[in-house]
Image (cartoon, coloured by chain):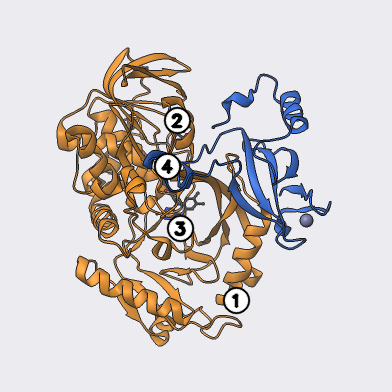
């Protein structure tokens, strides 16, 4: 069971209050993009064994979306942050670096 | 390989069972193989088996990081059926179901295939329409299924409550030749047959890298050294994305946990498999008498082989509505497996951007039933470069928008 904190309303609750929304920071491709880019955006996922940046919605709370950094092999939550950003903030990256020495943000897919 | 038979049992009984051999050799990795299969689950082993049996390719290694069948193959609830909607699915699942019928004889290994019949309950008007449509599609595909009314459901499943508080049972999609099999035996039977053909089944051998030269695979790195190969089959279910990452491409797959549980053993009370997709639960009774129960997947990416308790609670709540008599049952065990889910709920059997590398994955919550058909098609794909069974399941279908939408047939996870 995950315990998450919604950065929008500050509530900390267990996972039944939230809805998982899949990989975060996908770069959106639309008209004019190549087939490969469009396919990548729509379907391809990094699905990492380890650090994962993902979207969650506070479904039974304030109803808003936010982002979480979490380890898929230990279920450790590194922190949550606003959805209004295209990449994880430095303090989240620092926490991950601290907890997973040697992990490099470069491993994140573009 | 010594053949198993009633005669062999009698003979061994006479000499204190001293004459049994190991079912498969404990092989050490060689320097090079024609084909390496990563993952000794049902799909990997079946692929190797049909490579040998149908195409005479036996210089094959099957590499397994843990123990044989220790992935989803040994963790599933063993439902076998082929009542899918789309033609390519019906073809591969029905091929598999029909191979299950003769698998024990074919492998000389008792996989305990039990075609006891599977009912998928229709509990909303929408489901009634959906299953009637599937029954019609199945008739055209040559898959024998039937839409049955509530009285017939009650006849087949006396312990069911047709007038549940939320969703009354309005009918069901019935496949009389669906059923269950013993999951470990499927893995063990294939492993024994592969080993007998001279293939190496190598356990505790984890692939950690995929080596390539000029866009073509040359071998793998493992915790037991480098091994070369001409062709590589990645058949690792929940770990497919991880292996694809080693090879340098991405897959349209998310790995999530799927849980199951079994009750204490009770006297025989239900001799068919019942699935209730609207309320998210399904149940069958094992030969030992345990009620085998499963439900839906957990919502988020997960590699831990355990899931969240509230999903179990949801499943059990739904099943108590449908089968009130189980409300006092004690549950014995609960576990999870990491399943590989695609957007259209259909598998991927395909070439990849790396020459010589093939993937067989995306079976998600329902691939046990497909093991022999998938191995049959995958072996043909790897040996000849194409197969009628796997053609529609290529990776290119996502780019081309040719989805094989089975979100209705896949329904609840099974
Ligand atoms: C709880 C549950 C219930 C289910 N119920 C049903 C059901 O009723 N009916 C049905 O049809 N299906 C069901 N399924 C789905 C079914 O179990 C799977 O689709 C099927 O078993 C997949 O088989 P596989 O051979 O592809 O994968 P697996 O059996 O998971 O085998 C993959 C193997 O690859 C190995 N591996 C991974 N990474 C590496 C590496 N780097 N190096 C070497 N080896 C590696 C793993 O250790 C594993 O043994 C269920 C699944 C679960 C979890
Ligand atoms: Zn909130």
Mark 4, secondary structure of its residue: loop
Q: Which residue is mark 3?
A: B414
Query: Residue A33 — which label?
Result: 4
Q: Is mark 2 within 8 Å of ligand 1?
A: yes
Q: Nearer the viewer, residue A79 or B219?
A: A79
Q: Is residue B132 left or right of residue A90?
A: left
User: Which of the 4 quarters of the picture holds residue B263?
Assistant: bottom right
3D distance between C-alphas at marks 4 and 2: 28 Å
Residue B319 drawn above or below residue B287:
below
Quadrant for the C terminus of chain B in the image: bottom left
The colour chain B appears in is orange
Q: CA distance from mark 3 to mark 2?
A: 24 Å
Instruction: Give the number of the disc on residue B243.
Output: 2
* Colour given to chain A in the rendered image: blue
Residue B151 relative to residue B98: left or right: right
Q: CA distance from mark 3 to mark 4?
A: 38 Å
The CB of the residue at mark 3 lies under 8 Å from ligand 1: yes
Task: Report x, y in % for residue B159.
Answer: 51, 78
**Residue B43 pos. (x, y %):** 35, 41
**Neighbourhood count class around disc 3 (C-alpha, 10 Å): few under 14, some 14–19, many 20 upward:** many
Does the rendering let one see residue B157? no
Q: Closest to the observer: B263 or B130?
A: B130
Label whose residue precedes the other's in the sequence (3 or 2): 2
Q: What residue did someone put label 1 on?
A: B321
């Amino acid at each position: 069971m995950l315990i998450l904190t919604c950065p929008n309303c500050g509530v900390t609750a267990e996972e039944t209050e939230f809805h998982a929304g899949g990989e975060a920071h996908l770069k959106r491709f639309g008209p004019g993009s190549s087939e490969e880019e469009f396919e990548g955006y729509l379907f391809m996922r990094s699905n990492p064994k380890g650090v994962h940046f993902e979207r969650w919605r506070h479904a039974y709370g304030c109803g808003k979306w936010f982002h979480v950094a979490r380890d898929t092999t230990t279920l450790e939550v590194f922190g949550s942050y606003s959805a209004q950003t295209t990449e994880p903030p430095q303090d989240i990256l620092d926490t991950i670096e601290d907890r997973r020495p040697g992990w490099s943000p470069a491993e994140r897919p573009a | 390989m010594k053949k198993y038979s009633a005669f062999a049992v009698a003979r061994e009984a006479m000499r204190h069972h001293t004459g049994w051999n190991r079912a498969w050799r404990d092989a050490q990795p060689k320097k090079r193989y024609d084909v390496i299969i990563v993952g000794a689950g049902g799909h990997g082993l079946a692929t190797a088996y049909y490579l040998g049996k149908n195409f005479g390719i036996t210089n094959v290694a099957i590499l397994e990081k843990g123990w044989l069948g220790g992935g989803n193959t040994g963790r599933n609830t063993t439902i076998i059926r082929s009542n899918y909607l789309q033609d390519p699915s019906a073809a591969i699942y029905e091929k598999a179901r029909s191979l299950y019928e003769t698998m024990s004889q074919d492998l000389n290994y008792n996989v305990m295939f039990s075609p006891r019949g599977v009912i998928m309950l229709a509990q909303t008007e929408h489901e009634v329409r959906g299953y009637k449509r599937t029954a019609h599609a199945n008739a055209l595909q040559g898959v024998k299924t039937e839409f049955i009314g509530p009285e017939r459901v009650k006849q087949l499943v006396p312990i069911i409550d047709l007038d549940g508080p939320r969703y009354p049972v309005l009918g069901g999609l019935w496949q009389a030749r669906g059923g269950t099999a013993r999951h470990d035996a499927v893995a063990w039977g294939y492993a024994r047959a592969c080993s007998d053909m001279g293939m190496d089944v190598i356990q505790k051998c984890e692939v950690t890298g995929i080596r390539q030269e000029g866009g073509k695979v040359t071998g793998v790195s493992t915790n037991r050294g480098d091994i070369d190969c001409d062709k590589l089959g990645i058949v690792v279910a929940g770990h497919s994305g991880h292996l694809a990452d080693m090879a340098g491409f991405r897959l349209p797959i998310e790995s999530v946990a799927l849980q199951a549980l079994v009750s204490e053993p009770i006297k025989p009370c239900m001799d068919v498999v019942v699935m209730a997709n609207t309320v998210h639960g399904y149940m069958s009774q094992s030969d030992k008498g345990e009620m085998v129960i499963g439900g839906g997947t957990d919502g988020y990416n997960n590699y831990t082989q355990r899931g969240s308790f509230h999903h179990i609670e949801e499943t059990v709540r739904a099943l108590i509505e449908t089968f009130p008599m189980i409300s006092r049952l004690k549950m014995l065990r609960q576990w999870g497996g990491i399943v590989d889910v695609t957007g259209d709920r259909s598998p991927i059997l395909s070439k990849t951007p790396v020459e010589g590398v093939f993937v067989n994955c995306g079976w998600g919550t329902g691939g046990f039933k497909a093991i022999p058909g998938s191995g049959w098609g995958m072996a043909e794909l790897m040996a000849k470069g194409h197969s009628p069974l796997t053609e529609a399941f290529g990776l290119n279908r996502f780019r081309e928008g040719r989805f094989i939408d089975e979100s209705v047939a896949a329904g609840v996870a099974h």
